Image: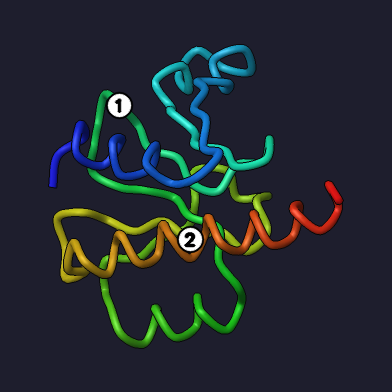
Amino acid sequence: MDIVEFREYCLSLEDVTEKMPFGKFAKRYDSILAFYVLGHMFCFIDVDDFSFVDVKSTPDEIADMLTSYSSIGNPINQSLKHWVKLYFDGDIPDSIMYEKVKRAYDIIRAKYYRKKQ
């Protein structure tokens, strides 16, 4: 998987937008590309170092991933609740990466779609 393919996948999901919002907080974060659904972030990558994706998840799903894969870490922003970093060059297959991104999208979309109605 490469960054172009990953970006195209994220943008193919319904109502997804992208922004690079973190550079205003710290220069070192100006290469972070975040993907949003209904105005809320569900995953982000570093365009200068495409080695990981941070995704929204649930505590149970994070615990399950921690027992299944070693290519998992803490998100860039430690204060993000229920987020996990998945490394592309480790033991997580691309198909699972896409599944976790889609799951993050579904979590955020379900939460905010109800509020929008």
Residue 97: which disc?
none
Residue 84: which disc?
2
Marked residue nearer the N-terminal end (2 or 1) = 1
- How packed mark 1 is, by other alpha carbons closer than 10 Å (few <14, some 14-19, many 20 or more), is some
11 vs 5, left or right, is right
Task: Classify 39 as above or below 114.
Answer: above
Q: Quadrant of residue 15?
A: top right
**Disc 1: which residue:** 47
**What kind of element bears circle 2?**
strand
- Residue 2 lies, in percent from the top left, at 14, 39
51 vs 80, left or right, is left
Between the C-alphas of marks 2 and 1, the distance is: 18 Å
| Amino acid at dot 1 | Val
- How packed mark 2 is, by other alpha carbons closer than 10 Å (few <14, some 14-19, many 20 or more), is many
- Residue 58 lies, in percent from the top left, at 60, 73
Residue positioned 43% across, 27% down in the render: 32
Residue positioned 51% across, 37% down in the render: 16
Q: Quadrant of residue 70?
A: bottom left
8 vs 11, left or right, is left
- Residue 37 lies, in percent from the top left, at 60, 42
**What kind of element bears circle 1?**
loop
| Amino acid at dot 2 | Val
Residue positioned 54% across, 15% down in the render: 23
Q: Quadrant of residue 28?
A: top left
- Residue 69 lies, in percent from the top left, at 28, 78
Whether label 2 touches label 1, CB < 8 Å: no
Q: Is 26 in front, or is 112? A: 112
Task: Classify 10 as above or below 19.
Answer: below
